[in-house]
Amino acid sequence: MMINQLKQFVPSSVCLQCDGCCRVELADSPWRPKVGQQEIQDGVDQAGYVKTIPQGDRHQCVFFNKTDNTCGIYGQRPFECALYPFVLSNSSRGLEMYMHLACPYVQQHQLSQELQEHAAYLKEFFSRPETKAYLKNNNRLLHDYTSHNQELQFLFTVEV
Ligand code: SF4
């Protein structure tokens, strides 16, 4: 499965201590993960977003275990979840890779060699024929984050 081939940038020990991901402020937030057509379909709404449930003053993904901060479908989680804190944006400029500046780990490492190396790894990963085929077959993952550019930093153009 494609997500098992994708190396994670943020160590799980860091993610498990963070209260950012998997929860959004608004029920219709554009930051809810989008799910590809060939990915898990249970718990996904008609627009292709993971469903959320109210939790305090936020909305959490239906798959999120708030007791231990884990994903209930980790091995089958959407590709967008596995890719985060990197974000694919498909706009009139073409398909581009960004990093999400809201992620605390990105904020701490955005000028680091580690991040530059991971960006180079992602560039190679997205040039692979199997990745291109995956995106073609799951083109719901290709949506436009242009209106959130103030939270994003451009990394590279993805050739499709
Ligand atoms: S599917 Fe898993 S990783 Fe993705 S938002 Fe839901 S709980 Fe988080």
Image: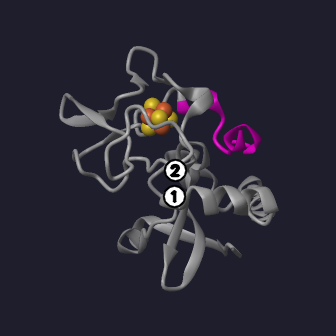
Judging from the image, what secondary structure is the residue with disc 1 in?
helix
Amino acid type at mark 1: Leu
Q: Residue furthest bottom?
A: 93
**Tags 1 and 2 in contact by the CB under 8 Å rule?**
yes
- Tag 2 secondary structure: loop
38 up-or-down from 129: above or below: above
* Nearer-N-terminus badge (1/2): 2
Q: Residue 8 magenta-drawn?
A: yes
Give the residue at mark 2.
36
Residue 141: mark: 1
Asked whether, in this view, residue 104 is left or right of residue 76, the answer is left
- Disc 1 from disc 2: Cα separation: 6 Å
The residue lying toward the viewer, choosing from 157 and 141, is 141
Is 159 covered by the magenta stretch? no
Q: Residue at x 51, y 36 (%)?
A: 40
In the displayed structure image, the side of residue 139 where residue 148 appears, left or right: left
Compared across the picture, whether 119 is left or right of 110 comes to: right
Does the Cβ of the disc 1 residue fall within 8 Å of ligand 1?
Answer: no
Q: Which residues are magenta?
A: 1-15
Q: Position of residue 127 (x, y in %)?
A: 78, 66
